Amino acid sequence: MQFTPLIALHASAAFLAVLTGPVALWARHGRITRPRLHRVFGRAWVMLMVITATSALFIRDFGLPNVAGFTPIHLLIVVTAAYLFAAFRALARGDIPRHRRCMQRLYIGACIVTGLFTLLPQRAMGQWVWGTWLGWL
C-alpha cells in the first residue's frame, strides 16, 4: 500500500486523536476539573475522529477479504459514528455519566485497540514504523 496524501491525513488525524483524547477525558476527573480545557480538547478530539473516520471511507484494501474494498476494519467507521451520536445525545439529555462512558469506550476502542492492531508488523503502518523507520524488521 502506497503512503498517499489520503493515508497521511488519516494517520495524522488518528495520531493526533490518540494524543488529544487523554487531555479531553481526564480534564474533568480528579479534585480539580478544567471544563474549558475539556471542551477545547474534546471538540478537537471529535473533529479528529470525524476526519479519521471519513478519510477511512476512501482507503480501500483489495488484498484482504473485502466487499468492494471495504474490509472488516471499516466497520469501525460505523462504530465511531454510533458512539459519537450516542455521546452527544447523552450530553444533550444531561446524562453526563453515559456521555463519559461513550467517549471513554470510543477512545479505548477506536484509538488504543485499533492503533495497536495498525502497528502489527504485517500491516502497512507496522512495516513502516518497525521496518523503515526503526529498522527492527
Image: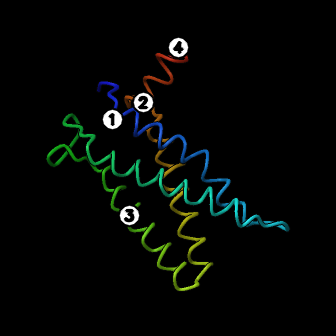
Residue 53: image x %, image y %? 37, 51
Label 4: element kind: loop
Earlier-in-chain disc, 3 versus 4: 3
Of the two numbered discs 1 and 4 in the rendering, the one whose residue sits closer to the viewer: 1
Along the line of sight, which residue is nearer the eye, 52 or 135?
52
Q: Name the residue under label 1.
A: 6
Please give the label number shown on residue 135. Answer: 4
Earlier-in-chain disc, 3 versus 2: 3
Residue type at mark 2: give it: Met
Q: Dot 1, how many residues are within 10 Å of its Cα: few (below 14), some (14-19), or many (20+)?
A: few
Q: In this view, does 19 lie to the left or right of 36?
A: left
At 42% from the left and 30% from the top, the residue drawn is 125
Residue type at mark 4: give it: Gly
At 22% from the left and 47% from the top, the residue drawn is 70
Residue at mark 1 to residue at mark 4: CA–CA distance: 25 Å
Residue type at mark 1: give it: Leu
Q: Are marks 3 and 2 in contact (CB under 8 Å)?
A: no
Label 3: element kind: helix
**60 to 83, vertically: above or below:** above
Q: Do the residues labelled 2 and 4 touch (CB within 8 Å)?
A: no
Residue 29: image x %, image y %? 75, 66
**133 to 18, vertically: above or below:** above
Of the two numbered discs 3 and 1 in the rendering, the one whose residue sits closer to the viewer: 1
Q: In this view, does 107 lie to the left or right of 71?
A: right
Of the two numbered discs 2 and 1 in the rendering, the one whose residue sits closer to the viewer: 1
At 68% from the left and 54% from the top, the residue drawn is 23
Q: Dot 4, how many residues are within 10 Å of its Cα: few (below 14), some (14-19), or many (20+)?
A: few
Residue type at mark 3: give it: Ala
Q: Name the residue under label 3.
A: 81
Please give the label number shown on residue 125. Answer: 2
Q: In this view, does 129 lie to the left or right of 2?
A: right
